[in-house]
Structure formats: structure tokens, C-alpha cells
Image: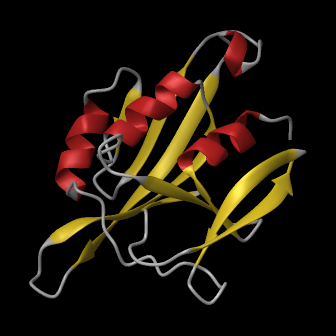
């Protein structure tokens, strides 16, 4: 999933069923993909510092990071091994100021670990949306969490 700041302006709200879960979808005003030009309230460096502070998180200078946890072969929700990796991307505005534009995330982790990574992006103060690349849909956070928790 790609994580973005919630786009500003009018958005088309729809519905879909993914993994047997009814979710709300977000589209651009014409029904196509939203225009992701808004940035998160944090800089690349600030997010990277926040990730460095997490236990069992490695963050590379190019923005790649890996957060791991758990032990054994049990599923992540039962305390088994999990991993969440991502890649940070920034965007410069016309004045040259850089802010986080999107974060690519993949893997699986407990909700608390996701909270810590999203916190590095400015959440919960910043409203985030999740673009499911393979499905071609964008979900608000609450629906992304429900989708992610469903059986694949």
C-alpha cells in the first residue's frame, strides 16, 4: 500500500468489497484516482529520526526501512514473527520546501506497530489514506485497517 496525506478538495466516496469486507473508497472528483499532491506534515529527516527511535527498526539513508518484531512461527497477531518494510518519498513544493509525499508499505504487523510507523508520518493529527496498488483503490485509514485485518 502507498500511504498519502488525504487529498484536499472534493472527493468521490464509493464502496467496494475486498476480502469479504465492505470498505469505503476514495476517488477523485471525476471518479478516477485521487490527485495526490498534498504532503504530510513531516520532513524526510523528521520521519527518519522517528523511525530510528523505534525498537527493532532499521532505516537506510535512501528512505528504506524495516521494522520487525515477535518470535516463533505463530501468526503476528499471536506474537509470532512479523515484518513491515517501507520506502519514504518526499516532494518539494514550488518554494523548495520538502515534505513527505508518500510511504510505500508492505508486510504485516500488529496494529500497535502500524500506529508507531504512522505516527512517524504525523498521524493521528494528519489524516492519511491508503492506496491499494494491486486493487486500484484508495481507502481511508479505518477501512484500510479492517481490510488489512481480514483473511487474505
Where in the figure is residue 13, as x and y percent of width and height? 64, 68
Where in the figure is residue 9, as x and y percent of width and height? 41, 77
Where in the figure is residue 49, as x and y percent of width and height? 20, 40
125 lies above or below 70 = below
Is there any visible trace of residue 132 in the rendered image? no
Left or right: where 109 falls relative to 53: right
Q: Residue at x 50, y 33 (%)?
A: 114
The residue sitting at the left extreme is: 95
101 lies above or below 109 = below
Q: Residue at x 11, y 81 (%)?
A: 96
> Which residue is more in the foreground, 103 or 81?
103
Left or right: where 94 falls relative to 83: left
> Which residue is more in the foreground, 40 or 68?
40
> Which residue is more in the foreground, 51 or 141?
141
Q: Residue at x 41, y 41 (%)?
A: 118
Coloring scheme of the render?
A: secondary structure
122 lies above or below 73 = below
Q: Quadrant location of the N terminus?
A: bottom right
Q: Quadrant location of the C terminus?
A: top right
74 lies above or below 67 = above
Left or right: where 85 falls relative to 41: right
Where in the figure is residue 57, as x and y percent of width and height? 39, 30
Please count the marks in the image.
0
Is there any visible trace of residue 79 in the rendered image? yes
The residue sitting at the right extreme is: 20
Amino acid at each position: 500500500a502507498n500511504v498519502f496525506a488525504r487529498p484536499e478538495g472534493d472527493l468521490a466516496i464509493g464502496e467496494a468489497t475486498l476480502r469479504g469486507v465492505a470498505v469505503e473508497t476514495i476517488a477523485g472528483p471525476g471518479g478516477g484516482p485521487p490527485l495526490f499532491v498534498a504532503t504530510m506534515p513531516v520532513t524526510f529527516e523528521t520521519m527518519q529520526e522517528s523511525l530510528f527511535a523505534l525498537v527493532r527498526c532499521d532505516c537506510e539513508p535512501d528512505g528504506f526501512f524495516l521494522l520487525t518484531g515477535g518470535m516463533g512461527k505463530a501468526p503476528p497477531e499471536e506474537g509470532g514473527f512479523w515484518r513491515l518494510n517501507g520506502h519514504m518519498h518526499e516532494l518539494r513544493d514550488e518554494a523548495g520546501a520538502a515534505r513527505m509525499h508518500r510511504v510505500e508499505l508492505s508486510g504485516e504487523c500488529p496494529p500497535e506497530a502500524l500506529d508507531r510507523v504512522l505516527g512517524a508520518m504525523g498521524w493521528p493529527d494528519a489524516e492519511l489514506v491508503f492506496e491499494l496498488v494491486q486493487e486500484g483503490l484508495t481507502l481511508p485509514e479505518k477501512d484500510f485497517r479492517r481490510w488489512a485485518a481480514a483473511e487474505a
